Structure formats: C-alpha cells, structure tokens
C-alpha cells in the first residue's frame, strides 16, 4: 500500500490543478455575453470546468473544500442554464417550417445520411462539407420519400429543399463561404443565409458586416441564418447581430447547446438564428454515427400566420 505521506503531495497537486481549471471556468463563464469577453474561453467549456470543480472538492483539504463546493454549485447552475431541460417541443396549430443543419464527414453514403432525416421530416437541409455522393441525392429513394427534390451548392455548403429555391447574391466575408437563397414555401417565401467559417476567423469585423447586410436587406424576411463552424463558447462576437435576430436555441432549445464533437458535445460550432417574424417551437441537436458534429434541427412557424 502507498503510505499516506506519499499520497498527500499528489493529492495536493491534483487539488491545485483542478482548482485552477474550475476558477478559470468561473472567471470566463459569467462574462461570456460581454463584448469584451476573450476568445480563449472556447477551450474550456462549462462541463470541463464542472468536472474540475468536483475533483477539487474531492481532493481539497478542509480549508479549501468550501471553495470547491461553491465553484461546483455555480458551474452546475451555469450548465443547467445552458441545458434548458425544462423546454420541450411546443406543438403549433400554424404551418411549420422545419430546417436541419448538419456538418458532415466525407466518404459517407448519401442514403445513410438522408435516412436519418426521417425523424425531422425537414423542409430544408443545410449541409456543411457534404460528401460528393450527395450530388446524386435526387436519385435516392429516401430523397423521394422525404420530397427533397431541389438542391443548390456553393463551395462547402449544400442546401437541399422540398420546395424550389432561387439563388440570390450572397454577402462576401473574405474566405468565409456564404450562400443566400429564397425558398419558395407555398406558405410564403423563406430567406436563408448560410455561412461556413471552418479554418477562418469570424471576428467582430465580419459579424458587423453580416449585421449590416441583414439590416440593409429588410425585404429578406422571414430570415434564417445558418452558421456552420462559426461559434464555440463565447458569444461576445455575435452581440451586434442580436439587434436583428435571435439564436433559435435560446427560444426553444433543449439539451446541451453544443454540437461538437458528437459523442461528447462541448462546443457550439453550428447554430441557427431567426428573425423576429419566426416563432420557435422546438430546437435541439441529435447524435449520428455518420458525422462528428451533431445534427441541428429547428421547428419554426411564422408569428403572424394563421
């Protein structure tokens, strides 16, 4: 057996390390909606900080145990706030518009991907980095069953739809890929702006330009903004956009608001925003063995529809 005198230094070292992680998580959690919030918090999601706080509580001495317990309680409250477990899908007596957003891996068969969409029965699917074999999706039985008969692709973004789509001139944000469409839903036109920022920095200048584009196109309503690989933990960079739109998850989300990696969701890299003309009835993420990102879905209705 290991002597107690030998385990104490190791226990103290673990307690100090866990305490540092927990305090760091606390210090960046509360200002994450601040315009001055740093970018590095995205490396330290709340679940990681919470585990560290519990480990701190378990390994700390009697003097520091209260601090560890307080940190664990605060971080648990932060995680519970994010989880939104009290929310649920709210049925609507109005026509709904169902959209799925999914960041994929290459080399996956299109029929396997599309078969999973049976659960959501989407009107529109936004794929980020789809496999090439999805180009023949209209030949697949599952596509015909879901009535996903229309497709438009631009670079790493593929949009498939139950309804015809008209491509519009997208905004340009440097190397960030964008696509702008009008979806001709029989219940009324829907405008979709999708972007993918993988490998690029989507910072304050790009978000201000995005906000300017949306503000100067008031005819493009109701509007959905689908952002892939464009957000992790800190929300500060998106503050200008909140004057015009809201994240759909914040209105009707349930489950942790993270989309990557799939088996251990820690980062919210894929997210949907909606303009004020929409009401959200259910928003969440679902796991698939075919992608490292969770599949993001939203059930929306027009606030003024009957």
Image (tube, grey):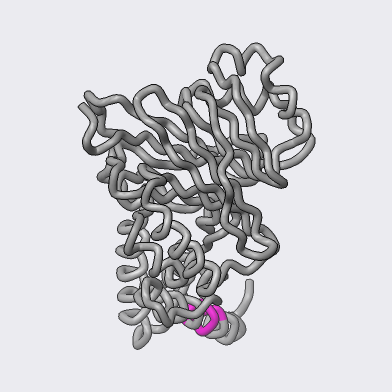
Q: Taking the image as drawn, is residue 4 in sight?
A: no
Principal SS element in the magenta part? helix
From what the image shows, is residue 180 above or below residue 163? below
Q: Taking the image as drawn, is residue 163 in sight?
A: yes
Q: Looking at the picture, tell me which residue is in the foreground, 135 or 235.
A: 135
Q: Is residue 18 magenta?
A: yes
Tell whether 173 sits left or right of 132: left
Rendered residue at 36%/42% (across/down): 222
Rendered residue at 34%/55% (across/down): 246
Rendered residue at 50%/24% (across/down): 163
Residue 148 drawn at (x, y percent) = 57, 21
Rendered residue at 30%/75% (across/down): 70
Residue 225 drawn at (x, y percent) = 46, 49
Q: Looking at the picture, tell me which residue is in the foreground, 262 or 192.
A: 192
Residue 82 drawn at (x, y percent) = 36, 57
Looking at the figure, which quarter contains the C terminus? top left
Q: Looking at the picture, tell me which residue is in the foreground, 214 or 279.
A: 214
Residue 42 drawn at (x, y percent) = 53, 69
Q: Is residue 37 magenta?
A: no
Tell whether 286 sits left or right of 77: right
Looking at the figure, which quarter contains the N terminus? bottom right
Please identify the quarter of the rendering in which residue 115 is found: top right
From what the image shows, is residue 213 above or below residue 98? below
Q: Looking at the picture, tell me which residue is in the foreground, 156 or 182.
A: 182
Query: What residue span does the magenta drawing correspond to?
Result: 14-19
From what the image shows, is residue 45 above or below residue 224? below
């Amino acid at each position: 057996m290991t002597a107690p005198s030998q385990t104490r230094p190791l226990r103290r070292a673990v307690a100090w390390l866990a305490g540092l992680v927990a305090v760091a998580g606390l210090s960046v959690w509360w200002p994450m909606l601040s315009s001055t919030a740093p970018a590095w918090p995205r490396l330290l999601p709340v679940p990681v900080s919470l585990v560290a706080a519990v480990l701190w509580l378990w390994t700390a001495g009697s003097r520091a145990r209260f601090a560890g317990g307080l940190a664990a309680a605060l971080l648990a409250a932060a995680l519970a706030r994010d989880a939104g477990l009290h929310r649920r899908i709210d049925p609507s007596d109005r026509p709904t518009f169902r959209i799925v957003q999914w960041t994929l891996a290459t080399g996956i068969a299109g029929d396997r991907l599309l078969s999973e969409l049976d659960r959501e029965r989407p009107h529109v699917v936004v794929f980020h980095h789809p496999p090439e074999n999805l180009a023949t999706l209209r030949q697949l039985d599952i596509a015909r069953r879901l009535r996903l008969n229309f497709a438009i692709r631009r670079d790493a973004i593929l949009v498939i739809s139950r309804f015809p789509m008209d491509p519009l001139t997208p905004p340009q944000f440097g190397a960030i890929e964008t696509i702008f469409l009008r979806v001709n839903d029989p219940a009324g036109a829907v405008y979709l702006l999708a972007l993918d920022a993988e490998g690029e920095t989507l910072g304050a200048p790009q978000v201000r330009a995005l906000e300017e584009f949306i503000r100067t196109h008031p005819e493009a309503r109701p509007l959905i903004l689908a952002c892939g690989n464009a957000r992790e933990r800190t929300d500060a960079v998106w503050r200008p956009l909140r004057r015009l739109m809201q994240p759909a998850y914040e209105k009707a989300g349930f489950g942790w608001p993270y989309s990557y990696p799939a088996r251990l969701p820690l980062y919210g890299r894929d997210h949907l925003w909606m303009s004020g003309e929409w009401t959200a009835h259910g928003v969440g993420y679902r796991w698939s063995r075919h992608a490292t990102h969770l599949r993001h879905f939203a059930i929306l209705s027009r606030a003024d529809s009957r």
